[in-house]
Image (cartoon, grey):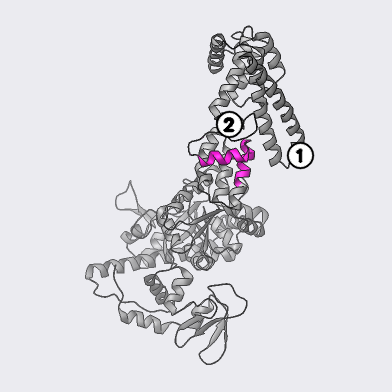
Amino acid sequence: MSRYTSDSRDRVFEAVDMISLVSARTELRRAGADSYFGLCPFHDERSPSFHVRPQERHYYCFGCQAAGDPFTFVMETEGLDFKAALETLADRFSVTLQSEDEDPAAASRRARRERLYSLLGRAASYYARFLWDSSEAAPARDYLQGRGLSDDILRQFRVGYAPSAWDRMLRASRSAGFSDEELVAAGLVQRSKTRPGQVYDRFRERIMFPSADARGRVLGFGARAMRENQRPKYLNTSDGELYHKRSQLFGIDHARAPAAKAGRMILVEGYTDVLALHQAGLRNAVGIMGTSFTDEQLRELSRVVAVLELCLDADQAGQAAMVRAAKMASERKPPLELRVVPLPQETDPADLVEYEGADALRERVERSQPFVVFHVARILDRGDLRSAEGKDAAFSELQPVLAELSPSALRDELMRKVSGRLELPEARLATLVANAGAVLAPSTASGNGGSAPPLAQELKAERALLALCIAMPDTGDEVLANINADELLTSELYRRAAKHLGGRCRAPMSELPPDDDELARTIADLVARAGQREDITVDRLHHARLLLELARLDRAIVRARVQGGEGVSELARERQDALEAYHGVVARLERAI
């Protein structure tokens, strides 16, 4: 990478109009010779304490002690390194930079890149003019305006339209002195596969979204199809000398400075999502152009902000992208903080602006939640929490997530939420979270909540009840007729077995569904276990039932507390009655030993 001469840096410094530069960030008022004051762009304040001396090209804040020259100002407000800040100021104040000891090959490469930048900039201007001036682009204008996007925001982002003719860009660029090879390198044309030597426009009959770097130089395009049968729906510039999709962030040239000031960046998926947020006044938004978030994009963002707010589509792909982004962000040193903007199901930010207005989008961004809140809710919503197996699978995912949380109000709130959804007492949940590899369990029959059997034991208790029902068919039919299997049993398989056995305990293998091999195997296993039991008594059967009844009431109490507490007292009385009955059965069993 070439270095610029000291003379180049000095000439840029001298060319900077400090008042013009700073006034883009905050309003300045004159307070004497070579003295201006304004609100500090680096911290929130009500009284102006930010002092600028334009002749010295220096600033200082009496409030937060921020200080520096034009280069540090651009580096701090736009999140750039020194070289990029130097180049940005040189562009802004029309200074040509010269490199030190640049060999001919390096000079040639730099000159070529400058020609490609120029070519792509001209192409963006051409497409933008065509969008606004041509009758062919009227449907594209209607589509964009129908999405609630204003003319002003479309012009700011240089949105354009590629005509349907196969050579409009080709001919316009040739007449401006650019070669076919340069057009291919810039990704504006492609070579014919059937006619050697012939090239034609890559983008035709599409809405054009220019993708630029942080300095606003166009590197390539994303192009949206206008016809239903036009494939692909989105066509991007191919990776080449300037454009690398994995590194691109749509809108970074507009969003970088507001994001650096805010300390956070909003990530969305698509082009129109970015436009919608900027139009809503949320200028710190960029698009990752799809659901694939890359290390290169994360590295670019980490130079600017410490907080990422994910405003991705509320579908499975968007949610999966958030999980991937969280993993990548957690691996950064220092890690980036991730927050999630909740969107209605199957809705993207542009849809929300179109149907509910910009205020609705702003309100949702303001209510962004820590990623862990979203992640816990996603695991719970995806899980089958009707069965013990499903709860166990959900807990296996939740355990490492909850274990990483330090003591806080947020952790307490999430623990209460998980406790309610898994129907598990909070004390028991806390014990399980603290023990990696643990599985879910009901609270103990005695109510101490501290030494409950693991999930496997609960399933064993359910299996024991059904086996005893078969071993004592008359009492078993009576017990099964008086229970609600869906509430008493946590295993979906054992629920099906209980419903089949009702009234059939003397002939459990009869009338089995011909298409349910799993149920047939389970009933056969229960029959075998019933024949092996030696402790067959009515009290053993009632002991098994009461043990499961206590666990059912524990789950119901947790659920009622989460839902506002209604009915908890009545459930507690039921549990006390069941516990007394349980103790009576246990006493009789102990006397029988």
Is 303 a magenta residue?
A: no
> Is residue 433 among what the camera can see?
yes
Query: Residues at badges 2 and 1 in contact (C-beta under 8 Å)?
Result: no
Q: Quadrant of residue 578?
A: top right
Q: Residues within 10 Å of mark 1 (few under 14, many from 20)?
A: few
Question: x, y (%) of residue 113?
Answer: 33, 66
SS for callout 1: loop
Residue type indicated by callout 1: Glu
- Of callouts 2 and 1, which one flags the residue occurring earlier in the amino acid sequence? 2
**Of residues 437 and 215, which is closer to you in this image?**
437
**Of residues 293 and 60, which is closer to you in this image?**
60
What residue appears at the point 58 percent right and 58 percent down from the top-left corner? Answer: 276
User: Is 161 left or right of 536, judged from the image as shown?
Assistant: left
> Is residue 346 among what the camera can see?
no
Question: x, y (%) of residue 544?
Answer: 63, 20
Q: Work out how far the residue at label 2 is from the one at label 1, CA to CA, in angstroms.
A: 26 Å
Residue type indicated by callout 2: Ala
The circle drawn on residue 452 is 2
Q: Is 274 situated above or below 502?
A: below
Image quadrant in which the N terminus is located: bottom left
Check disc 1 and report the residue beneath it.
566
The circle drawn on residue 529 is none
